[in-house]
Amino acid sequence: MKYLNFIIIILASINHILADECNGWRITSPIAEGLVWTAGQYYDVSWEPGNSQVETVDIVDLYTDNNELTATQWNGPISVKTLTTGNFQLQVSSTGIYYLNVTATTSSGGKCSLNSVSFTIITESPGPSSSDTSMSPAPTSSSVPTSSPTPEDP
């Protein structure tokens, strides 16, 4: 029992350290809820390391709203000092609600993971509405964090 308590304390410490290493890293685009994107078109996901110890972005995955992996949009790694925006062609076979998961590595080798806001991807191109003639969102940025870092299990 003594060893089990020791292991639990060590694992809790590692989780706390990883949370600190990830703190400050955030997704800066997409940040607006309710976006509607078209399958087959290219869209951006942007990130900012902030005060975190994130050094590389390793993978960007596209998930359905019920957490099923749809596609790996990009497989790195790439330095966050080199690239802060990825541009991806969204390949989906059905209209639905999706989100992006961005996984990164810190300077100590820890893993951090962030989810974007949810957005709708449609498989057929709608006509432009009378209030908006654009077919895709413009990349945006904000100084307000939109997601919290989640350390992955060691």
Image (cartoon, rainbow, N blue to C red):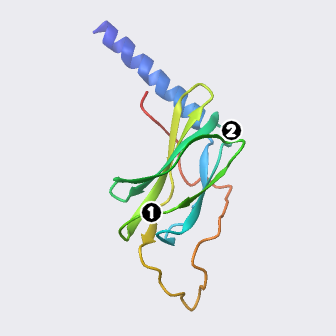
Give the farthest residue toward the right: 81
Left or right for 2, reference 33:
left
The image shows residue 34 at horizontal and vertical percentages of 49, 71
Residue at which label 1 appears: 91
Q: Residue 12 falls in which quadrant of the image?
A: top left
Looking at this view, is 136 or 3 the one in front?
Answer: 136
Q: Quadrant of residue 104?
A: top right
Q: Amino acid under label 1?
A: Gln
> Which residue is situated farthest in the bottom direction here?
130
Query: Farthest residue in the top direction?
Result: 2
Q: Quadrant of the N terminus?
A: top left
Q: Residue at x 40, y 64 (%)?
A: 92
Q: Position of residue 6 (x, y in %)?
A: 38, 12
Q: Dot 1, how many residues are within 10 Å of its Cα: few (below 14), some (14-19), or many (20+)?
A: some
Measuring 41% from the left and 74% from the top, which residue is drawn there?
Answer: 123
Taking 132 as reference, is 111 above or below it?
above
Nearest the viewer among 39 and 100 is 39
- Residue at x 48%, y 22% (from the top left corner): 13
User: Pointer 2: what residue?
Assistant: 51
> Within 10 Å of the Cα at label 2, are there few (<14), some (14-19), or many (20+) other Cα atoms?
few
Residue at 59%, 88% (x, y): give it. Answer: 131
First in residue order: circle 2 vs circle 1: 2
Determine whether, in the image, residue 77 is placed left or right of residue 101.
right
Q: Is residue 75 above or below residue 45?
A: above
